[in-house]
Image (spheres, helix red, strand yellow):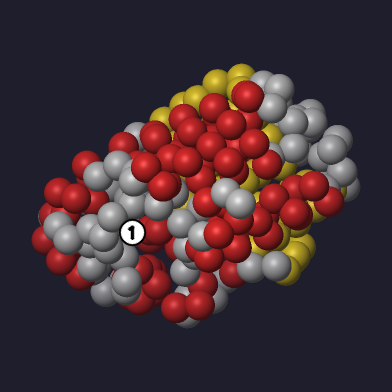
């Protein structure tokens, strides 16, 4: 038995891997993962600087080993240490199984929105317990000193879903990000306010493929056809 088998929080990652295996290997694919296991964050400085635990690194390598190697992978990531370490560990496991990583690129939107007043982060607990409420309030225009949610949404979709839709082969785009960008993505794709149940565990996330020009979302064990105009 490995950490992948014994850690309860890996259930969401397992669902994603099972779904990937069911998708036609000729279809392009997007995976978006929250970073792997870390210690509890207590301050804003923690949110920008903390990396993974050794457990988090081991499970990320195991995740990489589980990803089917039928597609080349381009990794996009937040450059915050825990996301970098997650991406590197996934790459290590994937490559060990014969998979090909074509590139790894940092993307600012996977860190989060632009802001002009650091005090806005006083509304978001450093460990993210209220992230769904924060995103809903931000989308509702309740905060100043932060990029408008609608503007961030456009940039985030351009960097993720629209990039996938424009792919002409069966490339896999693998994204490693944080609670905040993950919940923003879900809010956009679901087109509704978030609930606490929408939050994902470490290495949880979502997948998107394109079939006959239609983007199809997989998350929390369910598939949904998305609006192609996203």
At 38% from the left and 58% from the top, the residue drawn is 180
- Residue 153 screen position, x and y as percent: 46, 55
Classify residue 71 by image quadrant. top right
At 64% from the left and 68% from the top, the residue drawn is 220
Q: Is residue 128 above or below residue 73?
A: below
| Residue 157 appears in the picture as rendered | no
Foreground of the two, 174 or 215: 174
At 32% from the left and 73% from the top, the residue drawn is 130
Which residue reaches farthest front? Answer: 1
Classify residue 15 by image quadrant. bottom right
Foreground of the two, 20 or 40: 40
Query: Mark 1 packing: few (<14 Cα in 10 Å), some, or many (20+)?
Result: some
Horizontal side of residue 143 vs 212, given as left or right? left
Foreground of the two, 34 or 53: 53
Q: Which residue is mark 1?
A: 148
- Residue 68 screen position, x and y as percent: 74, 37
The local secondary structure at tag 1 comes to loop
């Amino acid at each position: 038995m490995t950490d992948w088998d014994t850690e309860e929080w890996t259930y969401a990652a397992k669902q994603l891997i099972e779904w990937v295996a069911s998708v036609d290997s000729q279809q392009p694919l997007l995976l978006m993962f929250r970073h792997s296991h870390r210690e509890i964050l207590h301050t804003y400085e923690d949110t920008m600087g903390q990396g993974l635990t050794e457990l988090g690194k081991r499970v990320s390598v195991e995740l990489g080993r589980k990803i089917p190697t039928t597609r080349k992978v381009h990794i996009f990531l937040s450059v915050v240490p825990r996301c970098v370490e997650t991406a590197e560990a996934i790459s290590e496991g994937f490559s060990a199984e014969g998979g090909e990583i074509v590139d790894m690129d940092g993307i600012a939107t996977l860190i989060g929105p632009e802001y002009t007043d650091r005090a806005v982060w006083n509304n978001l607990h450093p460990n993210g317990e209220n992230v769904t409420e924060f995103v809903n309030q931000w989308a509702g225009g309740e905060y100043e000193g932060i990029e408008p949610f609608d503007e961030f949404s456009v940039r985030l979709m351009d960097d993720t879903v629209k990039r996938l839709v424009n792919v002409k082969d069966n490339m896999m785009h693998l994204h490693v990000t944080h609670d905040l960008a993950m919940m923003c993505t879900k809010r956009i794709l679901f087109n509704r306010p978030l609930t606490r149940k929408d939050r994902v565990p470490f290495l949880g996330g979502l997948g998107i493929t394109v079939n006959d020009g239609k983007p199809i979302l997989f998350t929390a064990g369910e598939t949904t056809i998305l609006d192609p105009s996203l």
